[in-house]
Image (tube, grey):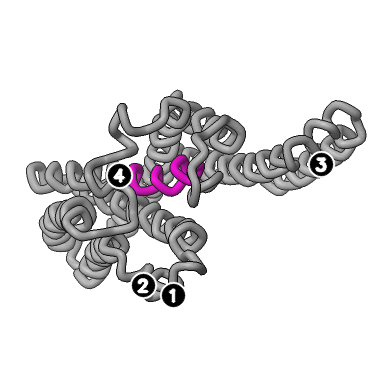
Amino acid sequence: MRLTWWKITAIVLLAYAVIGGILLPVPELTQLGETIRNLYYHVCMWFAMMILFTISIAQSIKYLRTGSIEHDIKASSYAGVGTYLGLLGYATGAIWASFTWADPNNPAFASFGSIMREPKLIGAAIALLIYGAYFILRSSITDMDQRARVSAVYNIFAYAMLFPSIWIIPRLLPSLHPGQEGNPALNFNDIDARMRMVFYPAVIGWTLLGAWIATLKIRHKILLEQKWFAHEK
Amino acid sequence: MKNKLIAFILSIGVFSANAQGAANNESMASLMRSNGKIYVVVAVVLTILFGLFAYLIRLDRKISKLEKES
């Protein structure tokens, strides 16, 4: 067991994110009510996803520079955990939206279909599907080196596609989703000071948890690889 | 391995028995029933979170053991 300092940090920060996130005071807003606390969980999923995808593309570029298969294993593991967190972010967003956007008094947003027309939701779905294609591409190539090279190049394309699909296009279109005119969660003047106290530690905590799971996947895959090579000899 | 699992299950039993004992305690009972019982939610979410952490740590240990063997 490698219980290093950052794993302990992840445990402590996430425990704080749950206790502080549920119990500490938050600004009282109509419509959102107590659901504003989802900032510590739903938004953190996307932040952690973005950070893990950034680590993934860095490993892909490292693979293309060095040709070492270890970087390919790292790139695919970080992308896998990132995609999973993205799916969790999507699912939690669906729950949150159905209780804050769907207003029974407003027929325009009464139906599920009109909520699903949100540009931010469609953009996020496109981004996740592009990463889904990354794994389909990987599993369709049997040659190890070719798979690593092709998927590293595709990973760079997938990361580049994140920017128009989740950062740019949703901001050009009218949307109910917050964050239309910038990054409200990142802006120091915009986010409430009381929420900042929990939000930033929560982002770090969820990201470290994602990285922890990814390192376990990496170590498992490296072990499998070693076993395979030992068997070949 | 099996012994560890049995010890783990037993420790859960001891822990939940403690929790019941604590619920009978006056101050704990009043804390858990205050503010619309929100502390119950905190306890439930923390239990799940730490259960997941325990799982991750066990997985980490198993992989470390395999790494030492190979």
How far is mark 2 from mark 1, CA to CA? Answer: 6 Å
- Give the Cα distance between marks 4 and 2: 31 Å
Classed neighbour count for the residue bearing mark 2: other residues with Cα under 10 Å, few (<14), some (14–19), many (≥20) = few
User: What secondary structure is marked by label 2?
Assistant: helix
Q: Nearer the viewer, residue B19 or A95?
A: A95
- Identify the residue under disc 2: A114
The residue pinned by badge 4 equals A52
Marks 4,2: beta carbons within 8 A:
no
Measure the alpha-carbon separation of dots 1 and 3: 44 Å
**Is residue A76 magenta-colored?**
no
Q: Which residue is mark 1?
A: A111
**Are both tags, 1 and 3, on one chain?**
no
Q: Are marks 4 and 2 on the same chain?
A: yes
> Residue A117 appears in which quarter of the rendering?
bottom left
Please provide percent x and percent y for residue A57.
Answer: 18, 47
**Residue at 37% across, 40% down:** A211
The residue stretch that appears in magenta: A36-48
Mark 3 or 2: in front is 2
Confirm or deny contact between disc 2 and disc 1 (CB under 8 A).
yes
Tell which of A178 and A67 is nearer to you. Answer: A178
Q: Main secondary structure of the magenta part?
A: helix
Question: On the image, numbered disc 3 is attached to which residue?
Answer: B16
Name the secondary structure under disc 4: helix
The disc labelled 3 sits on which kind of residue? Ser
For marks 3 and 4, give the CA distance.
Answer: 37 Å
Amino acid type for the residue under numbered disc 1: Ser
- Residue shown at 28% from the left, 32% from the top: A187
Answer yes or no: are tags 2 and 1 on the same subunit.
Answer: yes
Label 3 secondary element: helix
Q: Amino acid at mark 2?
A: Ser
Spatial CA distance of label 4 from label 1 is 34 Å
